[in-house]
Amino acid sequence: MGVGLSRRASDLKGRYIHKLRQKVPNMGVDEILEWYREYKTLSRGKNLLTEVEFVELYQYLFPGLSWKLAKHIFRAFDTDRDGTLNFEEFLVGLSMTDLSRDEDSCRRRTRWIFQVYDIDNNGSISWDEIGEIINVAYNLTSKDSNRPKVNEFTKQLFQDMDTNRDNKVSFDEFLSATKRNEEIIKLLFKEMPTCTD
């Protein structure tokens, strides 16, 4: 994990760049170096980006994004669950916003969105987690807090996703549901293409 992170962008070469290119094939070397400079600026020269710094960055990049949703996105980026983001986690997470429609990109992006919904990181999505994310998304798009409408939508969405009726949504159920109902993705990321069969 930390290999090469203390190097300046001009020194970010060799095996580490090769490793990053394998993890983010949709980004070229110049784009990786540009994001590395941005990352170092935002982290104030440190090798780790805190949740607060990340939320500030995400709200700058995506005006109107709520701090609560940015915190859920941070959690999905933080793959080692240490409460900070190294450059690799930051870059890989950022690459999930790639708008490619090929099957591999769609599956990786859907896995990442699943992780945004999976608040407790247990590998499945509960009713409460779906409710939390829908409430965050609803608060982004509506000034009217019509809770009965939100609760009904949450109930319907959960029932549509939980096809085996075990009161949790697995990644496979989530993937299938996103192919049937693009609203699951569009709730959080309006510009992101959905995957189809």
Image (cartoon, helix red, strand yellow):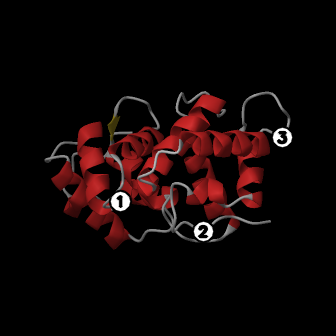
Percent x, y of residue 91: 39, 55
Q: Quick one: label 3 or label 1, which is nearer the N terminus? A: 1
* Residue type pointed to by label 2: Pro
Q: Nearer the viewer, residue 13 or 123?
A: 123
Q: Quick one: label 3 or label 2, which is nearer the N terminus? A: 3
Looking at the rendered structure, which numbered label has been put on residue 182? none
Q: Which residue is mark 3?
A: 163
* Residue type pointed to by label 1: Gly
Using residue 150 as the reference point, say whether residue 97 is left or right of it.
Answer: left
Disc 3 residue crowd, few under 14, some 14–19, many 20+, Cα 10 Å: some
Using residue 105 as the reference point, say whether residue 47 is left or right of it.
Answer: left
Question: Image point 30% across, 61% down: which residue?
Answer: 63
Looking at the rendered structure, which numbered label has been put on residue 193? 2
Secondary structure at numbered mark 3:
loop
Q: Quick one: label 2 or label 1, which is nearer the N terminus? A: 1
Percent x, y of residue 67: 33, 44
Which quarter of the figure is the C terminus placed in? bottom right
Q: Is residue 173 above or below residue 106?
A: above
The answer for how far apart the CA atoms under marks 3 and 1 are is 46 Å
Residue 23 seen in this snapshot: yes
Image marks 3 and 1: residues in contact by CB distance under 8 Å: no
For the image, the number of numbered tags is 3
* Residue type pointed to by label 3: Thr
Q: Which residue is mark 1?
A: 14
Secondary structure at numbered mark 1:
helix
Question: Image point 56% across, 49% down: which residue?
Answer: 113
Percent x, y of residue 182: 67, 61
